Image (cartoon, rainbow, N blue to C red):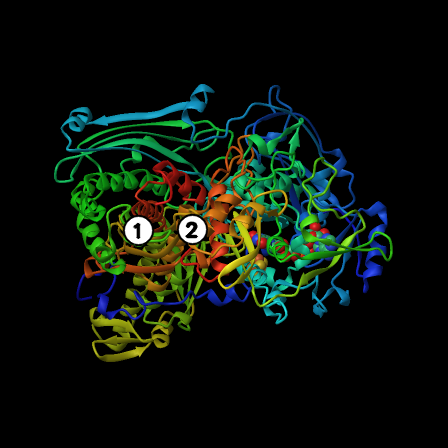
Amino acid sequence: MKNFEFASPQTESEAVGLLQDHGGRTAVLAGGTDLVGLLQADLVAPERVVDVRQIQSMQGVRRDADGLWVGVLTTLDEVMASPLLKPYLSLVQVADAHHAIQIQSSGTLGGDLCHLPNCWYYRNGYGLLAMQDGESLVQTGDNRYHAILGNSGPAKFVNASRFAPALIAWGAKVRIIGPAPDQVEVVPLEYFYVSPKSANQGNTILKPGQLISHIWLPAVEPTHVSATYEVLQLEGLDWPLASASVTLDVEGGVVRAARVVLGHVAPTPWVSLEAASILRNQMVSEDLANAAGAAAVSKATPLSNNEYKVQIAKTAVKRAVLKAVGQLEGGL
Amino acid sequence: MAEERKFGWGPRQDNVLIGKSIQRIDGFEKVSGRAKYTADMNTPGTLYAKLLTCTHAHARLKKLDVEPAKKIPGVRAVYVFPAGDLKPEGSGEIFWDGTLIAAVAADRPEIAEDGVKAIIAEYEVLEHIVDEEDLAAAEAAKATKAVGKNAKGKVEDALKTAKHVHKGYYGVNTISHMCLEPHGTHCEWKADEVLDVHASTQNVSGLAGQFAGPLGIDAAKVLVTANFEGGGFGSKFAADEWGIAAAKMAKETGKPVKLMLDRATELKAAGTRPSGYIDVTLGADETGKIIAWDSHHWGSGGISGGAIPVGGVPYVFDFENRNRSATQLNCNVGPTRAWRAPPHPQLCILTHCAIDDLAAKIGKDSYDVFLHNLEQTAGTAPHLPATYKAEMEIAAKLIGWKEKWHPHGKDAGKGAIKRGLGMALHTWGGGAGGCACNVKIHADGSVESFVGSQDIGTGTRTIIAITLAETFGLPLAGIKVNLGSNKYPASAASGGSITVGGVSGAHRRAAQTALWKIFDLVAEKYKVDAGTLAAKGGSIVSGEKKICTWKQAAMLLGPMGLETKGEGPAEDGLTSSRVGGVQMADVSVDSETGIVRVNKFVAVQDCGLILDELTAKSQIYGGVIMGIAYALSEERVMDKKTGRYINADLQNYKLPRIGDIGEIIVDIYQPDSEYNRGVIGLGEPPVISPGAAISNAVANALGVRVPVVPLTPQRVLAALSKKGGAA
Ligand SMILES: Cc1cc2nc3c(=O)[nH]c(=O)nc-3n(C[C@H](O)[C@H](O)[C@H](O)COP(=O)(O)OP(=O)(O)OC[C@H]3O[C@@H](n4cnc5c(N)ncnc54)[C@H](O)[C@@H]3O)c2cc1C
Ligand code: SF4
């Protein structure tokens, strides 16, 4: 670990200010559950670490006229306990599925959304794109956990966030602050992630000196149902092999609108319009859910060693749909 | 003296402590954090050492410049390992990712890390081969070596006459030991050039010489201490090059040096269990009796050997007609070390999965085929067929085999989840290891013992205390056990499940010798027949009559008390060897995701005389948990592209948590006939069968074999898609 300055601002604008120095070679510390490991491995080597945990305005969940503002410092435990978040079942299910007391008590939503990829080439020091001599190590290396969709570019890692699929399926937005003192932007979460095209590009639209402060969620209508299905090899402290979150608007048993988002299958959370269109104006049944799953992976381009993830992603979509309408039986 | 005095255990029904469930006597120290492990040693001035390792699978070190490290304030010493030594012409070739190049000792761990980063190492990268399963590729690369071939009977003829023939392919990938406490030492030079080593070791009495040689000092000048140990599993017998490095840097700096491996290096360099893959053909007659076995197996233990030898298959069973051969792949992967019951877990998978598939081919219940062939285990030990039969019956009842079993792939349940049952059996020696000890009875009646053995977490302290307390009729609290120092009488390394027999035999002998002396003194003083005396409940009694208290008896020893020696092993019936053991698994498989969960796991285990039923059962629980780990999720992943051990961390090296384990039912098979055999070791047998039992259960659930263990979702789905889709 490289030595760094440590700052603990009390307000958002202070935080933004502190992030500007050292040419933006600064890092945001939330729960620290991932950042500390990254620092120790020298994968992130900032000149200054800005601990945002003291910032009151970035904590808690507040209602406004047409939705909720969720502070990014909301911990996984708080997601499970919050009465306001309770109707967003697909989110609560993700927090619960971590099955790790330490992570749930200190990990935050913001940290999850900005979590750097778990790609083992990246974590072993080969860079986000894992390029060596102009060649992608992932392409011919061990890509069992890598992308099966959106992998034709140089990025082949999978997005690490576990909450993003559920949040995107709910139509969430993120509030980005900085780099100018009072600069604020609210962006649909769907457009927050990028698949980097070059080594110096990150995997989000965040520029040096920016951070996210809040997540906005639209209000839940009585006809809205949601669910997340994550395929986890181990019962806890594991990353999904693939996951799917769905938010459905169901009236009289018929799906009026659907959002289907897959996780851990592509360099960004993967919005499946194909799956959504299969569901629209139909009654949910096992066959329909199956068809949605098949549609979601119809354009999959598995790498040399991850064909199996196609089947897993398809199952995740099918089961998320069935789970949302209370029709899921079984599953390990 | 009425009857001849012979060493032996007392009648089973008279035991107060032996065979009962007794908590570890050091349990409180451990859970309260008071127990000091090697990693906890921090004597004043201790320097912390960090390692530079090679990150290439095969390379030539062209340049190594450690000077920049030395210039960093707080760095006190830099040590270059033999692999980093470029002196002899032609040296510098590195054969695997994780090879130790240099160590830096500094005032603080992070300064040592800075030092490591400052070292300049330049490599010429060479071609590597890390795929341990791909025999053809290794042959093409000329990276194989035949390691043996032998034959018995007439295999070809037998296969021709066989009613049922099954050809199969099976395998098990390499795993690392993954000790919770990594390998390492704390080395400090004391007055008179004495090297004081705290080591995380399974080999307290055998380590001094290993340090003395390379350091050029007398073994008598090396003090080795290991009071507690965070896991070894067969990988901690040596001083190791990093131990020598710590000692040398301590010498150079005049300060204590602590060098514990980091997690990645622990996984890469400190031991692995070698892989094994087999092509096998079996033939059975019309009754299901196996009459022929024809196999070739291969795998890798690294660049310098260590692959599974030819002799181990078929495992436990042997058949009239049998051909076998083996090939070693010289892969650019880290070296192997003994891993709990080497290499039985692999042999069990390679053999018992094949037998299970043969049973399916015959159209019989695997249970019946195993049962029908038990006579063919008699070659391993004559008593085994009967033991296995009894254990199979118990295990079958506990898991509900007859009610739940269905032919492979014929789970009647709808849905994606399929259930199945599988079994396997195993054997292990576990005879007593060499052990010498002293037992001291102080004049006040307190009892102390000294032995150069170690408690590697298995409960050695506790079973010594039980042995002495039972012999002297005292409470456990009346015994002080001293172990973990090479200044105590020498005892064998703890490997091969030989410790419990070794230490219990020797301590019983020492204790009985002392007790007889005390009986003689009591007999003389109180005018009773020594042959009628017994030590019970803190007193010396003759039949129902109390003669004197233990303290009064001890006083008769005079102010010096009494010290007796115990040795072993001996052919006196206190200890024995060779156990069986049967395990059965009930699993559910999600045929749409490939995820496998163990619902219930039954382990029935014999092990002679049980000293402490609680610690014995703990060994079995632990063995089964380790078994479920390597059966379902744990494996070394060697990336073919970079040649690196790509999952050498605690995130991607997937270990199960308690929620992944399911229900484990342990049943110790202990009729009087087992008690009468004496003490036999148990550390290893229970870890052998889980891989095969679980693989067989998955095959039973799905109707298709997932050939290679661990049974990850990827492998399960691949097997299913080969079969033609979800079951
Ligand atoms: C040993 C271990 C194993 C784990 N295993 C798993 C696992 O298997 N599965 C799983 O799902 N999770 C796992 N995690 C948890 C993971 O770290 C969590 O997802 C957690 O929610 C991250 O939150 P944090 O607040 O701790 O993030 P931090 O570590 O504080 O931050 C994570 C990243 O986000 C950035 N960041 C944080 N907040 C902001 C912000 N407001 N704006 C911009 N950038 C920001 C940081 O700079 C950093 O790069 C594991 C953690 C540990 C320690
Ligand atoms: S294993 Fe659990 S208790 Fe131990 S250090 Fe890790 S998080 Fe803490």
Q: Residues within 10 Å of mark 1 (few under 14, many from 20)?
A: many
Q: Residue at x 62, y 70 (%)?
A: A82
* Residue B457 visible, this orientation: yes
Circle count: 2
Question: Is label 2 in a helix, a strand or a loop?
Answer: helix
Q: Do the residues at pointers 1 and 2 share their chain?
A: no
Q: Quadrant of residue A30?
A: bottom right
In the image, what residue occupies the spot 58% across and 32% down? A139
Q: Which of B245 and B451 is in front in this view?
A: B245
Q: Nearer the viewer, residue B209 or A45?
A: A45
Q: Quadrant of residue B373?
A: top left
* B429 is higher (above) or lower (below) than A131: below
Image location of residue B660, percent across then percent down = 44, 56
Q: Residue B102's x, y, as percent?
A: 65, 36
User: As shown in the figure, which amino acid type bears the numbered disc 2?
Assistant: Asp
Q: Tell me the number on the disc at residue A250.
A: none
Specify whether A290 is left or right of A272.
left
Q: Mark 2 points at which residue?
A: A287
Residue contact between numbered discs 1 and 2, judged by CB atoms under 8 Å? no
Question: Mark 1 falls on what kind of element?
Answer: strand
The numbered mark 2 sits on a residue in which chain? A
Is residue B314 toward the left or the right of residue B28 in the image?
Answer: left
Amino acid type indicated by mark 1: Gly
Position of the C terminus of chain A, as image quadrant, is: bottom left
Front in this rendered view, residue B644 or A146: A146
Q: Which chain carries label 1?
A: B
Look at the image and tell me whether residue A35 can be seen.
no
Q: Nearer the viewer, mark 1 or mark 2?
A: 2
Q: Residue B420, which numbered label? A: 1
Q: Which residue is drawn at 51% across and 29% down?
A: B332
Between B725 and B714, which is closer to the camera in this rendering? B725
